[in-house]
Each structure stands twice: as C-alpha cells, then as structure tokens.
Image: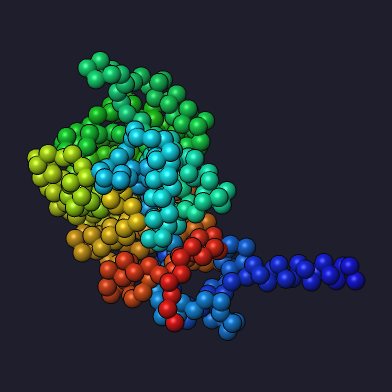
Amino acid sequence: MRFLLLVFAAVMMYAQDRIVLQTGTLLDGKGGTLKNQQIVIEKGRIVSIGTGKAKADYNLSKLTVMPGWIDTHIHLNWHMDANHKSVSNGGKPEDMALYTAADGWMTLQAGFTTVQSVGSPIDGLVRDRINEGAIPGPRVLTSLGQIQAMTGAPGQQRARTVEELKQMVRQSKADGADVIKLFATAGLGAGGGQTMTDEQVQAVCGEAKAQGLRSVVHAIGDSGAKAAVLAGCTAIEHGTFVSNETLDLMVKRGTYFDPNFLVLHNYLENKASYTFTDAALATLEKGLAPTADVLRRARARNVKLVFGTDAVAGAHGRNYEEFIYRVKDGGEKPMDAIVSATSMSAESLGMGKDTGTLAAGYQADIIAVEGDPLSDITAVRRVVFVMKGGKIVKNLVRE
Ligand SMILES: [Zn+2]
C-alpha cells in the first residue's frame, strides 16, 4: 500500500510537471515549418512534438510559435537614468544592479530567452540570481569585462604584453566569465582601425581557447577582423568594413559573424540621452549602409551569421527591431534572420544542443508572436507568449 501511494504521488508530480502547448504554425529554428503540432514539456524540457490530440494547457494555434530568441551581443548594465541619460558605468552600485536586472527582465519579455552580455562585472551577479530563480530574466552569458590592447592613465598609455593579456583571460575565467570580449579595432567614430596587434589578438583568443572559453571580437575595420579570424577567435562583432577576402576566411575557419544595425539606430533615435557631437552622429548614420552591405555579402557567402544588436541604453526590450533592419535594409530572408537568432546563435554560444531549436530534448525556451513574421517581419514586435525552461514568463494570448 505504501508503495502504491508512493507511485501515485510520483505520478501526480509527473502530471503537474507536464505542459501541452497546442500550436498552429511552428518554426523549428532550423528553417523548418510545422503545422498543427502539440509540444509536450516535462521538467522544463521538450519531450515530444507531434500531431497529438491531448488536452492542451495553452492554445497557441492562432500564433507563430518558435524557439526563444538569442541576442549574442548586448550590454545588460548600460541603462537610462531617471533623467533619461545614458549610464554605462559609475553611479550608485545599487542603481547599477537594479537597472541591470531590469534590462534583463525587459529583454526576456521581448522574447529573448538567452543573451550574451559583453560585459560588466555586475552581469555576473545578475546572472547568478537569475539562475537561482530568485529574479526573472533570460539565460545570461557574460564576459564580465572587456580586454583592450593598452593600459595606463591617459597620456601614459602602453601596450599590454602578451603575458599580461593571457593573465587577464585567466583572471576573467577565475572571476566566472562565460566568454572573453576583446577590442581588435577602434570604434566606428574613430575609423575602426586596428588597435590590437596580431600578436595581442593571438594571445587573447589563444589563451581563451586554452581555458575552454569562447572569444568575441569587436572589429570595425578589415585588418582587425582578419587578424581575429586568423587567430581562431570565435566571433566577430560589427564587421562594418570587412572585405570579401576576410568573409571568405570566416567561412573557411568557421568564424561566427554578428553585424549590428540596432545600436546605430538607437544612438540616432536617442541622441538627446548621449553626448555625441554632430560629426559623430553623422559618422554613425554613415555606418548604416556599409552594415547592410556587409550583411548581404556575408549572407551570399554563407558566413555563419548570428544575431546581435549591441543593445545599450534605450535598446533593451526592443532588441527584435534588429530583425526588421536585417530583412528590410539588409535584404535578409525572414526565415534566415529567425534561424540566425535561434539555432545558429545557440550553436555559436556552445548551446546548440540545449536551446535555439524546437525538438525533443531541448530546453522549453518557446515564444509566440501574433501574425506571420515570414510574410510581415514586423510581427516580431508582437511577442505575446514567452516560456523559458518550461516556465511561462509572459502570456498575453487572447482566445
Ligand atoms: Zn558592444
């Protein structure tokens, strides 16, 4: 009898742990479209997808269901203060912690169940509280900081040695970084020239690999991007002026590429919150056409394009605008943009067997939008259902 009771209790727990989603249109994250499927979830993971007839707990049949999106390039801590001014460091530590957590929550509600923040030390604390289930937020991977070529006070700068750079990588790992972020070039406003020597790039990405960490590289100009690809770095961010030769090299080396539109539009739209000069704003605007151009050239070559926005203050919670720029300005097919933001980005983060795809065995990271993003990409703005690891964090579904 006692045995039977135990079995009964176990079955009850099992039953409570089971969720059935009825879908109408399902994008699997790998380019496939399935119709009228039921997704069965147990213990936070998908156990089956099929044409079952079980009683559904949630009816998503009028929506487009897909894997939770992934943004591989954000700055979680970078926020607007009470006066709507951009803050990326300084201020009160308690403000920074709360704004970082708030940015995570906004981003999750926007349909992004995984983000990579590159990055600030506060990210690690927010990541850990989210992982404990203490606060809501996306899966967070973070570099905790950024590695630059130079060190020292302004006017007394010197190049870091190879050994110093390797030590910084090891320290990042010891501090709990999930990834290493480095700057191989200057910013767009400064022309994007190479700032880190080839040897320095090799030192950082080589040591990252030796420590079992991925490396993502800020590179605007071609020479810095090429150095990073040759050094075996994992991913190139921005890549505004990357040549076809370097794109071909990325294909050969399996380097991931993350071009970003939203960051430029966001600066232009929120210029009152930033301190850009008119000349700097003009330079940012001039960066849009080359971004569209490099995306087209990369897509034509089958470069492994991931999804990243470089979201800073003003962009958190509307990261999905990047889809619209990529399709409308960069000529990308909606399905390609969605695969980029799901299975391809997951693969680039080393999570390709865990999230970014709707299939048995994967985390139940599932979102739904109103409308059909394949025919109208602006449907990505209408996220009405978000589930992360089998837990519903947003449900605005109307029957
Ligand atoms: Zn960035």
- Which image quarter holds the C terminus? bottom left
Q: Residue furthest right?
A: 1
Q: Position of residue 202 (x, y in %)?
A: 36, 30
Q: Residue furthest front?
A: 82
Residue at the outermost bottom position: 53
Q: On the rendered structure, is 44 left or right of 94?
A: right
Q: Position of residue 383 (x, y in %)?
A: 38, 67
Instruction: Write the residue at 52% across / 76% down.
Output: 58
Q: How many marks?
A: 0
Horizontal and vertical percent position of residue 148: 32, 29
Asked if one can make out residue 381 in the rendered structure from this viewpoint, the answer is yes
Which residue sits furthest top?
Answer: 156
In this rendered view, identify the residue nearer to me: 80 or 365. Answer: 80
What residue is shown at x 34% (from left), y 33% (from top)? 90
Name the residue: 37% across, 53% down.
71
Query: Which residue is rendered at x = 38% and y = 60% of the image?
Result: 110
Horizontal placement of 353 versus 2: left or right?
Answer: left
The image's colour scheme reads rainbow
Above or below 337: residue 157: above
Quick check: can you spot residue 346? no
Q: Quadrant of residue 10?
A: bottom right
Tell me where residue 5 sits by quadrant: bottom right
Out of 352 and 59, give the one closest to the viewer: 59
Judging depth in this view, the residue of 266 and 44 nearest the camera is 266
> The N terminus lies in which quarter of the figure?
bottom right
The image position of residue 67, as x and y in percent, is 44, 64
